[in-house]
Image (cartoon, rainbow, N blue to C red):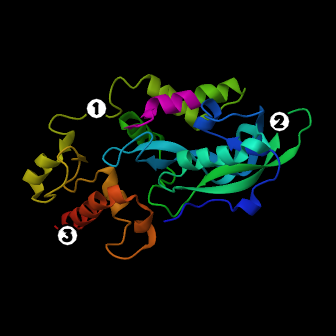
Amino acid sequence: MPAKIVPEAELSKGDLWVFGYGSLMWRPGFEFIEQVPARLIGEHRALCVYSFDHRGTPEKPGLVLGLDRGGACRGVAFRVAAMQRGDVVDYLRSREQTTHVYREVMRSVWLENEARERVSALAYVVDRGHVQYAGRLSLAEQLRFVQQGHGRSGNNRDYVLATVKSIEAQGFRDAQLHQLAAMLHGDARPLHPPLEGEGRLTLSAAKCETGWGEGLSTHTPFETRDRHPTPPLLSFASTLPLQGRGKWSRIPKQHRRQLMQLRVAKTQCLDR
């Protein structure tokens, strides 16, 4: 599926403003002329994207931030020189659009400087129709994913804590992220220690009890509180059509086979 990008004609002429609300605040990765605290109205920062790449894997997804509808978001606006605009946009697309879970858009942001001016800035908003959209998760659910997540850009815990540190450096707080950070600082023990005879189970053990799941990775974790093990990817896979396009076409090819197996496995499990 093609990336959801801003047509060249809609990109601002001259210098380009880029709005950062997550890792871009503390690791922009591109050259800029200035950075200014800024506020975007109409969308808020949320850990609402399952990460299969930078901070997790398809087997053990992490959670990363997205701009989701409603509210407002304080972040950082970076001003990029006109002559570097093309290179910076290409870089951002290669970084943010690996699985096409974000929509590239232009948004009005208010700079929190002496001029208090409004500028049009490039931003990345979550696509609510994408299979990696997590929606609104409880703090306990967020903690579970963040604790397990590790991808090519590092572990998920560091991502959350670095974002909180950057937010504090800007002189404000994000109530939910700060609460999650406090929980992560005390994450030496599991959130819910398993009771005797309970806990987590690999797929090979699950197959012994349920008789299904043949052909899937034996490293996939399953919850055993009920007799229908449901790892995170089964929730994703259940939203995918077994045939046709739609959400299925949004998944990178290297992940489709496993998701198809999981989709079939869940159907077999729930039919028991």
How far apart, in angstroms, are the residues tagged by discs 3 and 1? Answer: 30 Å
Residue at x-position 65% and y-position 30%: 167
Give the quadrant of residue 115: top right
Q: Which amino acid is tagged 3? A: Asp
Number of other residues with Cα within 10 Å of mark 3, as a class: few under 14, some 14 to 19, many 20 or more: few
- State the extent of the magenta-drawn residues as a range: 150-163
Q: Which dot marks residue 112?
A: 2
Number of other residues with Cα within 10 Å of mark 2, as a class: few under 14, some 14 to 19, many 20 or more: some
Q: Nearer the viewer, mark 2 or mark 1?
A: 2
Q: Position of residue 175 (x, y in %)?
A: 61, 35
Name the secondary structure under disc 2.
loop
Give the quadrant of residue 6: bottom right
Q: Which residue is mark 3?
A: 271
How far apart, in angstroms, are the residues tagged by discs 2 and 1? Answer: 45 Å
How far apart, in angstroms, are the residues tagged by discs 3 and 2? Answer: 56 Å
The earlier-in-sequence mark between 3 and 2 is 2
